[in-house]
Image (cartoon, rainbow, N blue to C red):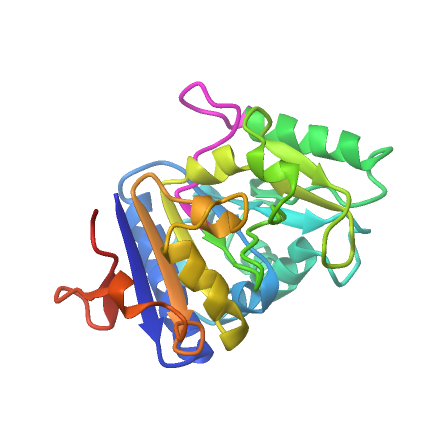
Amino acid sequence: MSRRVIIHADAAAMVDAVSERFVTKLIELQAEQPVVHVCLTGGSSGINLLRVTADSPRLAEVSWSRVHFWWGDDRYVPADHTDRNALQAEQALVAGLVEFFGLPEENVHPLPPQGVFTNIEDAAGAAATELAEFGIEGREFPVFDICFLGVGPDGHVASLFPGHATVRESERSVITELDSPKPPPERISLTMPVLNASTRVWFVLAGADKSSALGLALAGANPLEVPAAGVEGTRTTIFFVDQAAATDVPHALIAPDDEWTGVYTLPQD
């Protein structure tokens, strides 16, 4: 298992590079397997990544009928609320893939919005049931071939926040968050076991306000205090960052990797 940090000059360069890598990886994976599962994230970097991907000249090379989209978390608000990660993703990329590139609507699996089920617990239960329908290898959830994640300034991932009991959840695939430190307070989120079953975890983060969280995550902080430190893909874990986000990463934690220009690999213990 490898953990890499790829540092780009700025947020725009980072998003451009990850978008190109994303489409290329989809094409490669589809040459090897019948279906690809992708978990999307929200936030400025996550949504900008989708906007850039929508303009990729290689979209037609992907067999979108064999791609499934999921979300790591979402705000429990009405479906048309601008805070919804799923709505932002739909507007940035997904709707265009459905309309022009043959992505089936049934391959898009947003977490339930407010108003569909009686309450948030029922909504989370429905999300868990849908995940289980695609479970493999004895798991009650699909294995994501690529799982995109952002990182909050406090080190949270998805809607798993520092000090919250949800970070320790090990039995359920989906949890409810009723007291998010950031509004709106109610969220639905995948849990650590689901995220950590992903083959590839690709973190995307930019900005100086993320540098402290990034440094702590790379230094192996307690995941209960810095949830981002507790997420790793089974094959690769890559932190795609800009220079501003990398300012607080201790130099002792990174070493040049001659194989990749601009890539730094964490030293092995």
Q: Is residue 82 left or right of residue 208?
A: right
Which residue: 60% across, 46% down?
Answer: 160
Q: Which residues are magenta?
A: 133-147
Which residue: 53% across, 63% down?
Answer: 46
Quarter of the N terminus within the rendering? top left
Furthest toward the left, the residue is: 258
How many numbered discs? 0
Along the line of sight, the residue nearer the viewer: 114 or 254: 254
Residue 61 visible in rendering: no
Furthest toward the top, the residue is: 138
Which residue: 59% across, 57% down?
Answer: 99
Task: Report if residue 141 lies within the magenta region.
Answer: yes
* Residue 252 image position (x, y, % from top left): 25, 65
Task: Report if residue 197 lies within the magenta region.
Answer: no
Q: Is residue 32 left or right of residue 257?
A: right
Residue 62 higher or lower than 53, as above or below: above
Q: Is residue 21 left or right of residue 47?
A: left
* Residue 64 image position (x, y, % from top left): 46, 49
